[in-house]
Amino acid sequence: MDIDEEKTILNLWKKPIMEITLGFALTSITLNFLWLQYILPAIGTVLIFIGVRSLRKENKYFTMAYFLAASQLVINAINLIIISTPLVVEIQNDIIFSLLLIGFRLALFLSLSSAIRNIFQKANVSNIQNSFFLAFIWILSFALLAISPLSNSWMAFILLTFFCILVIRSLQCLGDELGNIGYGIISIEDRLSNTVVVRGYLIICLVLVISCGVAANHAVPNFTEIKFSTASDTRNILMEFDVPEEILNDMSYENISMLQNAIHVDVYTDLLMFDGVSEMVETGTRMYKEYIKPKNRTIEATTVYTELPDNEIYVLVYFKWQKPKAFWNDGFTIWGEEGIELLDGKLFYQKDGTDYEASIPRLKNDFVTTESMFFGASQSKQISGGVCYPFGSENQRGYVFYRLKLSEEQGIVPNCINYLHSKNPISLPYTFAEQKILSGHREYKQHYTTYDLKKYQDMQE
């Protein structure tokens, strides 16, 4: 395009360069709250695309950058799919995927740097700084710092932050400087306006996150029609020990048979209220006491301790939703005495008068690392698992069954179940509910009980 003819045209460089600048800033900043670490990069990626889109006809380097920017849109969408599903657990430490993301971004800004250099050559200009090359250097420095021993250095972080600010300011100036050299932009008529592209892409990202979240967080185990245990002498003995009949109905014949030599049973029940309502009740003249009333999201948690001869204890942790609500990746952890031997874990529900059962997903008894605000990281052996039921299911319930052998010196058995309820299917990044508990998530409810061996109970009496 003839330079003299374009001198009279308004600065058409400023808008696309500003879009690229804003996109660079948004994809370089990480704010880990309100999901901004995912929202801002998505907006930044599409802003870079529409900026490059307006310049793609200027030279071959801008054309190359256009295709790389389009690839970045796809990569960002794939990344949103990954972080919305269990794939994030497998890929979060994958160096190849991380290198792919960095590689595409480096290639994009290197192409933009070559494109601007080509414009400078055509306009016979040499006194303007190539801001895109500075952006390329910043991205490369950031990547090298991330894999270096200085990755946790505050000084290095501060220096990179100042460098990033300088790059952004330089990119802002570039649009004005390009307008002053008298080199115009080839006009492009696109069917879709930039506004439509931005809104459309962000809507697609939102739909992907929601649909992947629904699919990943509603992973229902393979339920089969339940086969109720037959009546037995052991079952009758346990009923005489006041074990609820509903719990015995759900226990398998094999599990009940393990308790045939029971000498004592204690049963403890508590309500875990996830949306309980506080209420002040008058207990006397000008005296009030606060009570928590259950609302819609309440679990009835029951712990059954069964003592056998020789200090052998069987523990059954039973939970039942008062209203069916466990549809989105609930989870639990159970801890107690050392030496727990996990025996069984089942989920149950009812639909159209028929009961169904399935093994608890991800059920395991293993050493885990727990995070605490006050005590930091610690290791212990805990039982953990997931909970999820089909839509339309009623009478949602389940249990975990384990045993332990106490030494002669031990006389008290503690048991604690931490249950985390997920109210919606969106979890970014995707994390198993039981892992959230171990990572210090505080929104779980706890049912803690202890059992004294029968010989100590007799001594106290």
Image (cartoon, rainbow, N blue to C red):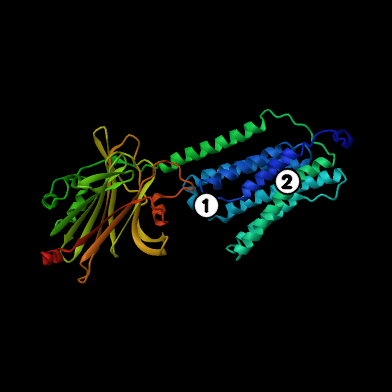
The secondary structure type at the circle numbered 1 is helix
Give percent across and percent down for residue 19.
69, 41
**Residue 318, image x and y in percent?**
25, 49
10 Å crowding of disc 2: few (<14), some (14-19), many (20+): some
* Residue labelled with disc 1: 91
Please provide percent x and percent y for residue 447: 28, 53
Q: Is residue 216 left or right of residue 386?
A: right
What's the mark number on residue 172? 2
The answer to whether residue 103 is above or below residue 63 is below
Q: Amino acid at mark 1?
A: Ile
- Locate residue 56 relative to residue 314 in the image: left or right: right
Q: Residue at x 71, y 48 (%)?
A: 109
Question: Residue 141 at what x, y percent from top left?
Answer: 67, 58
Q: Who's the residue at 63% across and 62% down the image? A: 156
Answer yes or no: is residue 110 visible: no
Please identify the quarter of the rendering in which residue 124 is found: top right
Pointer 2 or 1: first along the chain = 1
Residue at the outermost right position: 4
Report, in whole angstroms, how far the alpha carbon at label 2 lies from the one at label 1.
Answer: 36 Å
Asked whether 39 or 389 is in front, the reply is 39
